[in-house]
Amino acid sequence: MSYYSNYEGNQISSVVTDRAKIQCASLCEHASSDFREAFEGYAAKNVRLDAFYHKLIGGQAEYADLFLVVKFVIILSHGNASVESGFSVNGDMLIENLHEESLVAQRQVYDGVRSLGGLLKVKIDKRMQQYARGAHFRYQTAMQAKKVVQQEEEKKVAARKRAAESIKVLKEKKAKLSADTATLSKNTELEIHELENE
């Protein structure tokens, strides 16, 4: 484990690093006795590595520093292969005019089939067949719901447009009234001035 690379990056102190190294040696000693079943029964396909170590040493005070280092090591990427693979799959699925929901749905299906071990491992039962039969009806319902939402949005846009136009007209009216008032006030002042001079 890269204790010192974490220390050099100022992520953990030298004291934590030294204690983690001692705790790692202790864990290795107990791996063949106390933790033997846990290590032998570990399967990467069934249990994530972070979940395995959390269950093994996550709640134990004597391995607190080691678990901190383990978290750092697991967080650090050992390569972006899975992420890049995901982008590659998304790139293969992208076609012209593909909606976001369709891409998400295709990706969910792809990930689901992959997690089962491939197409030949997918169990097609009665429930799945019924779900597939009702797909077109659910599609039509979703399209109608989307159409209603779109119409509501168009109504809101039209209402905002009308309000903006009304505000513009009222502002122009206000400016005209202000100009008329200023002119009337000026004329009145002139009349008063003339009368005072007489």
Image (cartoon, rainbow, N blue to C red):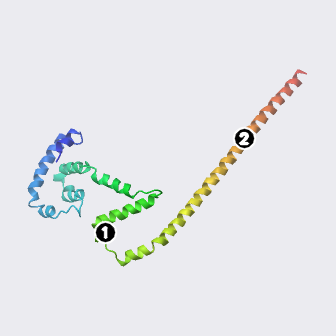
Choose between 190 and 117: the one closer to the eye. 117
Q: Is residue 36 visible?
A: yes
Residue that label 1 marks: 119
Q: Residues within 10 Å of mark 2 (few under 14, many from 20)?
A: few
Vertical placement of residue 62 versus 5, above or below: below
x and y percentages locating residue 38 in the rendered image: 15, 62
Q: Is residue 59 visible?
A: no
* Disc 2 from disc 1: Cα separation: 68 Å
Quarter holding residue 168: top right
Report whether 173 appears left or right of 44: right
Image quarter in which the C terminus is found: top right
Q: Tell me, for residue 141, which label it has, or none.
A: none
Choose between 50 and 60: the one closer to the eye. 50
The mark closer to the camera, 2 or 1, is: 1
Identity of the residue drawn at 48% across and 71% down: 136
Most extreme residue toward the top, as rendered?
Answer: 197
Vertical placement of residue 73 versus 150, above or below: above
x and y percentages locating residue 15 in the rendered image: 16, 42
Tag 2–tag 1 contact (CB < 8 Å): no
Identity of the residue drawn at 20% across and 38% down: 8
Q: Tell me, for residue 172, which label it has, or none.
A: 2
The kind of secondary structure element at disc 2 is: helix
Report whether 168 appears left or right of 137: right
Identity of the residue drawn at 85% across and 24% down: 193
Amino acid, disc 1: Leu
x and y percentages locating residue 16 in the rendered image: 18, 44
Report whether 126 appears left or right of 197: left
Quarter holding residue 102: bottom left
Count of all numbered marks drawn on residues in the image:
2
